[in-house]
Amino acid sequence: MKKSNKLLLGGFLTLLLAIAAVQITLSARYKSGNYTLYTVDRDPAFEAIEGFSGARTIKVENISSASIAFSDVPLVSKQYKHLLELVRDGETLVIRGKYKFNWDDSSDQVILYLPANLSYTLKNSTIIFRSVKLSQITNVDVNLQNGNAIFSGTRVPMSLDNLKIVALQNSNASLIGNTTIKNMDVQLSNSSVSVNEATPGNISIITDSISRISLPYKLFSTAKITTTTGQ
């Protein structure tokens, strides 16, 4: 065998032995429980939200397009933190867009990680709500004032027990992707709601005569829709 071939073979065998050693070490750590799982709170791109403790309501103002991911740990993106103003007002955490900024460029990025079981108010804002893990979310309560809420299960499936939406003043709520909801209650005033690919269970909608409802045909037969006469 040529010397060069011997060197290549020797190098290859050394690499195999190194890989085997790493595999044995990792296997031993896994069996002994000596390992660390990746979690959102360890993501170096995010930091804890100061002053969040005890907040029961999240009010988002003047953010034209961004994402909130449901998580047990409240975090804010370091990359976009300087564009946000976070103010505590009693039990409400107010999140405002500080500058005129083309948020559309960052709409696919997660800006905030926040718990689901809070009351959310979106004013002059568009927020995409996402899940970060496969788990059942109990309650989500969203109030829209000239705002848009998009519940997206396109990346990670979203499963909700109860979703309550109040949409006022030319607002819109949309459900897209793999989103499953047991109970969905909607109140519309000069606004709209649309369901695309999502699979709500029980649907109750109270609407005025000028609001718009877009549901798959099979859901219209089971949805409870009440039209009010007052404005």
Image (cartoon, rainbow, N blue to C red):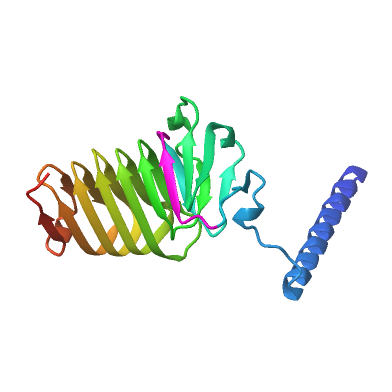
The question of residue 213 being in magenta is answered with no
Q: Position of residue 62 (x, y in %)?
A: 41, 34
Q: Residue furthest left?
A: 229
Q: Position of residue 180 (x, y in %)?
A: 33, 62
Q: Position of residue 153 (x, y in %)?
A: 39, 53
Identity of the residue drawn at 86% across and 55% down: 14
Report which quarter residue 211 is drawn in: top left
Q: Quadrant of the C terminus?
A: top left
Q: Residue furthest right?
A: 3
Q: Residue furthest front?
A: 90
Identity of the residue drawn at 26% across and 47% down: 167
Report which quarter residue 83 is drawn in: top right
User: As rendered, which of 49 and 179 lies closer to the eye?
Assistant: 49
User: As rendered, which of 92 and 200 lies closer to the eye?
Assistant: 92
Whether residue 201 is visible to the viewer of this picture, yes or no, is: yes
Whether residue 197 is visible to the viewer of this picture, yes or no, is: no
Region in magenta: 54-64
Q: Position of residue 65 (x, y in %)?
A: 41, 36
User: As rendered, which of 25 and 228 lies closer to the eye?
Assistant: 228
Left or right side of 12 for 185: left
116 lies above or below 28: above
Identity of the residue drawn at 27% across and 61% down: 184
User: As rendered, which of 87 and 8 lies closer to the eye?
Assistant: 87
Left or right side of 39 for 94: left
Identity of the residue drawn at 32% across and 59% down: 163
